[in-house]
Amino acid sequence: MAVSRMALVAIVVVVVVVAGLATYFLTLPKAPGPAVTPTPTPVVTPTPAPGPAPQLRSVKVAILYDPSNPVLKLEGEAAKLAIDEINAGGGILGVKVDYKTWNTMRRVDVAVSAYREAVVDWGAQYVLLEGVTEEMIALMEEGAKLYPQYPHILMYCGMGADVTIKVINEYDKYKFAFRIYTPDYAGNVIGPSSIFWNVKNVIKVNKIALLIEAAAWTEGARKGARYETKHGVIEQKPVRDIAREAGLEVVYEAEIPVGEKDFLKYLEIAYAKGAELIFVMSSWYTDTTTLAKQWATSKARDIYLVLYGGTNAWTIFWDLTGGAALGVLSPITEFESPEDAYPPVAPPTPYYFSVVKKMHEKGLRVDGSAHYYYSAVYHVKEAIEYVARQGRDPNNIDEVIKALETVPCSAHTLLPKDKARLGLTELKVGDFVQKGLFHSYPAGPVALYQFQGRDKFAYIGYGIQNPYVVTWYPEDFIREHYVTFGTFSPPKPPSELRKALGIS
Amino acid sequence: MYSELMLTLIYTFIFGSQYLGIALGISIIAGILRIFYVAYPALFLIPAYGTWMFWHDVGLPFELSIFLSFALTFAIVALMHKFVTNKFLETEDTMLMAFFLAYLIIEQIISLVYPEAAGVNLPTLIIPWMVLGIPGQLMLIAIVSLAMIALYIFFFVKTKTGLIMRAISQSYLYSKIMGINFGLMFSMAMIIAAIPPGVIMLLTSSVGPFNPYVGWTFFSYGIMVAVLGGLGNLKGTIIAAYVLGLVESVVAFLFSQPRLSILICLIIVEIMLILRPRGLARAESVW
């Protein structure tokens, strides 16, 4: 029988493809953990399953971070601390938590390679990534391919709207991905909104300058953003509009390039434009230590300076700046005890101070992300235990995912228990409705402190009058800590603080 | 408009003088040794972190710590000269790599021992008040930079050693024929070139960036100035420093575009490099 050339080619192609696929599937390493569930996992219900509950076999946590960077190292160390604590307390359901670390060097290719190794070779069921958004997006794509064979959960504390939007819009593909932080479209509205409320009502100034770090996470804050999701449209206003709606006049706005070292030019212009307060939307990319030093010796030093993220979140910021931090307003995330703060403040959650103390004992500082990584480990523990309590299989990652969406983290060190949820779709804080939070935590108001001396921090404007505060904390919590929440202490002008300390 | 003009004028002087202080050492080494000294960023770090080490960790008086930190810097420079310059003077690519690695090693050691979280800071804020409406410390840095350049010019023009160094920078071959002790002159050049970055870093640390990675930032500014001026010529370095100071100030204050100021400076240097590869001075010798 004569076979045409085309038919011969087609036969060869089919044979090669079939042989290739067969070779691929036959040589795949055996997946650790539970077998793949081909059908969608049923929703977790509170009804206990009949019969004895399956035993938890193992808990393997892979920590992907960059330990060579002293700042980024903190996040991985915080997660390790939580694991050590859990193991010291008997583990999860009596099973010791194993962990292994990988150095991602904050590079996408290295992170993907480490991720594959962690999940495929080592059998990690839980992966904690500390890195940039680009790494997380790449890992989500890789994870989507791996998940059917190697069910696992990927957690990341960082920015990038896509991280959450992808999960919302393509749940089945990306359900394993969690942002253990606030999505930028919520965080970049709630945080500045609560600060602007304080600026207007507590600090009582009107003219402000906005210096915004020109990084990916501030894109929505600089230009505004709009996302269409299955949970509705999310609108993010530019931060200048948020300020104006708070009744403030924005007299100067500038973008600060990542890596900037000379802030004096921006400060001089802010001063020349008549700003009474400078709000710097900063993160670790901005050298806030240098910024504070330049502010303290410039003409702008009598203007209030409010910093967002960066080394200013550490109490040691005072030392880093050689005391130039005097008068700077900033969120601070590492008080060891309520007595450290002046006037005394109540803990945001009961666990906050203990983690800070333990990290300090290890010689490590604590930023907001360190809190989130530490808490994430406890959130996983609570989710696994919840699955087991329901009589379901705690080894089944689909079940744990559902549990993470359902169970609040009662041991979160920054978020109130009822807000430490990864399954919310929307939440109202102050005047703003946060939409599309799914697989992310909601954003809360920013607590501002003023550096008033070495180890002397004034807690300002976090009063019960602040709508962002009262809709964030449970009413009984506010009542219990009424002294704190009722305190309405305005910051002191920098010139007054300098005078009190005899600084010219 | 008047205030913008005044800001531009004042900051032209301030930025220009700072650039001068930063680039001074690069120009001296490039002018005399005819090498591209990529270990230069370490010269910003060693005096500053050395001072902290002797003062904070060893517990010595602050002034003595500064003195010892410079002694430490000179010792490291001398070692680099012995094991790198001497050895690889004829194979420049190897020398570049060796210097660069030496700098990276020093930077890594510093970041390991004194990470940012260690809270390193130096009490070198001498003038905390404003002078002519600008930070007094910046004015001090500018004046110190000018004083250093004046001293170096005096050294090169009025002393015998300076004359020898100028001769080397003019003609390596003829100076060799005249029997100049190259080893000694090169060591001296590297040591005197190590002083300005250390002084600038000590004074700047209280009002500017100070972390284990800042050496490279300063180095890049220094290179920008040295290249525009003509690598290895002090006259060119002076002109280039103030040209860049002017451009930076005009863009930042007159046009209110501080974010673009360094970019514009870099573009100007790039264009200059293409049009006049030997820089503004177009000179052969260090002075």
Image (cartoon, coloured by chain):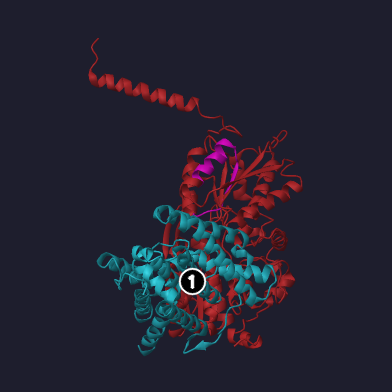
Chain colours: A red, B cyan
Dividing the picture into quadrants, the one containing residue A54 is top right
Amino acid on which the number 1 mark rests in the picture: Ile
Chain part drawn in magenta: A111-132
**Does the magenta segment cover residue A119?**
yes
Check the residue under mark 1 and report the chain it is in: B
**Does the magenta segment cover residue A171?**
no
At x 66%, y 37%, the residue is: A393
Residue A470 lies left or right of residue A206; in this view the side is: right
Q: Position of residue A423 (x, y in %)?
A: 57, 52
User: Does residue A503 sit above or below B24 in this rendering?
Assistant: below
At x 59%, y 88%, the residue is: A504
Q: Kindly give the residue lying farthest to the right in the view shown.
A: A89
Q: Secondary structure at mark 1?
A: helix
User: Does residue A192 sit above or below B149 in this rendering?
Assistant: above
Write down the residue under mark 1: B192
Q: Nearer the viewer, residue A128 or A394?
A: A128
Whether residue A34 appears in this view of the structure is yes
At x 64%, y 54%, the residue is: A77
Q: Position of residue A67 (x, y in %)?
A: 59, 53
Dividing the picture into quadrants, the one containing residue B128 is bottom right
Dividing the picture into quadrants, the one containing residue A388 is top right
